[in-house]
Image (cartoon, rainbow, N blue to C red):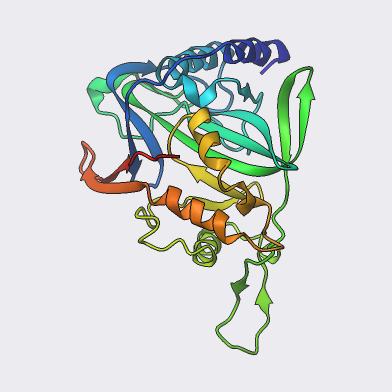
Amino acid sequence: MKVQDYQSINRILNETAAKNKPGEIYVDNLHSPYIQFSDRFIIPGTSVTQPEFGDIKEFVQTVLKHIPEAIEGTYLLPEPRPKRETGKLFFVRPMMFGSSRFLYVFSVDMLYLGGARSEEVKKAGSQNMTPSIITDRLYFQIKIIHLQSTKEEGENVTDFQAKRFQGGIFRVESEKDANKPIRRFSEIFDEIDFSETESKIREELGITPEVWKLGRIYSPIGIDYLSLSLRFLIPSLPNTIKQFRNFYPILTETEAGIPDETLKKYHDYLSLFEVERTQSKSGNILWKVIQKSSDN
């Protein structure tokens, strides 16, 4: 994407101030979250390897129409992070709590991942083009990471470097044999699948089934960009910041130890979420996510 292209979109994002349309949050059988609306809209077909700017701009307008709170005041990155995530748009917003910098990362998928029926395919895909789909949902992910640095073009954030997670109080037992040394997380970053690592992190943080009822359906904490990250399920930057400010030391106090008060606030937040098992139109398992109201 050319500099002037993403800058023009960022100007629109900077001027955005609207409320999200009502929608229901689901996690599908591939553990991908999405928000479903009562109305339907078109996701345009675009290049498989490099989406055209016109298609990107049209899709951003769709996101702004349905969940403007998710990307208001953010910067659209000129390339996905990681770069292999073609077909996804990444919006970021640096922020400061205490003496530490963090980065809000919202990604949304320009591809339809729900197995569209024939009548929902407006234009079939080809070898180099994705199909144009009539849909009622947007697939997304929300993460906050501890930020090392950002790269800018003028006032626009164009790239970032996460603060690498060094392990701290978190640890992974490489063997059940008590005589074997304990591996710290910093020693296993070459591994591709972090699911076991994330499981150990949840265990260290006391995230039990009573605290987090989604279990392994969707992990609220994990490893992203080789950094410890917190993950959220409500596509709203103001809502995410409001909650994150209560327990941000989870990302910064891994060496000294996370304060009990911080951990309690995090557990209280996670306990607001409930889940109902249901099915998709094609019969696949779905989980509907419900957030109870909070006084905080």
Q: Would residue 144 be visible to someone looking at this image? A: yes
> From the image, which quarter does the N terminus lie in?
top right
Identify the residue shown where x is 40% and y is 19%: 66
Task: Write the residue at 64% across / 51% down.
Answer: 249
State which quadrant residue 133 falls in.
top left
Question: 35 and 246: which one is in front?
Answer: 246
Q: Could you tell me residue 158's position as x and y percent?
A: 72, 26
Q: Horizontal placement of 2 versus 280: left or right?
A: right
Relative to the observer, which residue lies in front, 259 or 17? 259
Residue 200: percent from the left, percent from the top? Answer: 53, 66
Q: In which quarter of the image is residue 152?
A: top right
Residue displayed at 39% across by 22% down: 131
Camera-side residue: 240 or 127?
Answer: 240
Please state the horizontal and vertical placement of residue 47, each as a whole percent of the image.
52, 22
User: With 15 as the anchor, is 98 left or right in this view?
Assistant: right
Total marks placed = 0
Regarding residue 227, the answer to whether it shows in the image is no
**Quarter of the picture holding the C terminus:** top left
Q: Observer-nearest residue: 187 or 131?
A: 187
In the image, residue 103 lies at what x, y percent?
A: 65, 37
